[in-house]
Amino acid sequence: AQTVTQSQPEMSVQEAETVTLSCTYDTSESDYYLFWYKQPPSRQMILVIRQEAYKQQNATENRFSVNFQKAAKSFSLKISDSQLGDAAMYFCAYLGIGDYKLSFGAGTTVTVRA
Amino acid sequence: AAGVIQSPRHLIKEKRETATLKCYPIPRHDTVYWYQQGPGQDPQFLISFYEKMQSDKGSIPDRFSAQQFSDYHSELNMSSLELGDSALYFCASSFAGEITDTQYFGPGTRLTVL
């Protein structure tokens, strides 16, 4: 089974500043998908960004971007210009090609200070 | 855009009772997934269906069963409920024709077993 590790239980960031969340994973596959999901206090799971492992270019969605290092099996999320609405739990997730089960990390709670 | 619909949103049951959770996927989506999220935990995969056939099975208790119907909606049936079944149950859906098999989550059903 794939293991996804988020080593930062909590992160705090000042409004308008940048924060980076780390995620590492373990797999023997060469192709797979990686995701970041956001879970605000409402507990809704919201897709933030996704990355195909065969793509070298890092994915970007507005203020959210990733640093995908395939050899290091690292997939960090950068939130730029942090806003109060970014406060949430962020989960990193792995999906193998042809798989159905998303493997999640333990999550990182992001607090945004006004 | 249409999202995944789950009903009910909240459910309170007594021990040993049964519960049925319903999930209506995003239109055109053919794959449905069920996850269980306990307090302070990451979502755990229970089961998935593709084109009305079970496609994968995770750590789903034998007391639970699920199916996907001809209109692609899915139901998770839970019998002999235990206190430990209290959790947030997510349904997610995806379209097999999409390259990344991105799973889009519903708002969840919060089950409380007393």
Image: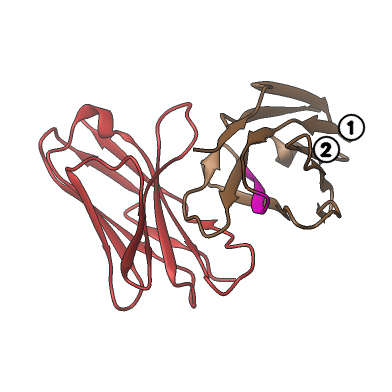
Percent of width and height locating residue B53: 31, 68
Say if A87 sits above or below B50 in the image. Answer: above
Instruction: Please report the residue visible at 48 percent of the width from the left and 76 percent of the height from the top.
Output: B27
Q: Is residue A83 visible?
A: no
Disc 2 marks which residue? A82
Say if B81 sits above or below B57 in the image. Answer: above
Which image quadrant for residue A82?
A: top right
Disc 1 marks which residue? A17
- What's the amino acid at mark 2? Ser
Mark 2 packing: few (<14 Cα in 10 Å), some, or many (20+)? many
Say if B92 sits above or below A45 in the image. Answer: below
Q: Is residue A29 or residue B60 the one in the foreground?
A: A29
Chain A's shade in the image? brown
Q: Which mark is residue A63?
A: none
Q: Is residue B60 magenta?
A: no
Chain B's shade in the image? red
Q: Is residue A67 visible?
A: yes
**Do the residues at pointers 1 and 2 share their chain?**
yes
Q: Element type at marker 1?
A: loop
What count of labels does the image hold? 2
Q: Is residue B47 or residue A78 the one in the foreground?
A: B47
Magenta-highlighted residues: A30-37
Say if B81 sits above or below B21 in the image. Answer: above
- What's the amino acid at mark 1? Glu
Q: How far is mark 1 from mark 2, CA to CA?
A: 5 Å
Mark 1 packing: few (<14 Cα in 10 Å), some, or many (20+)? few
Q: Is residue A48 left or right of residue A46?
A: right
Q: Is residue A34 magenta?
A: yes
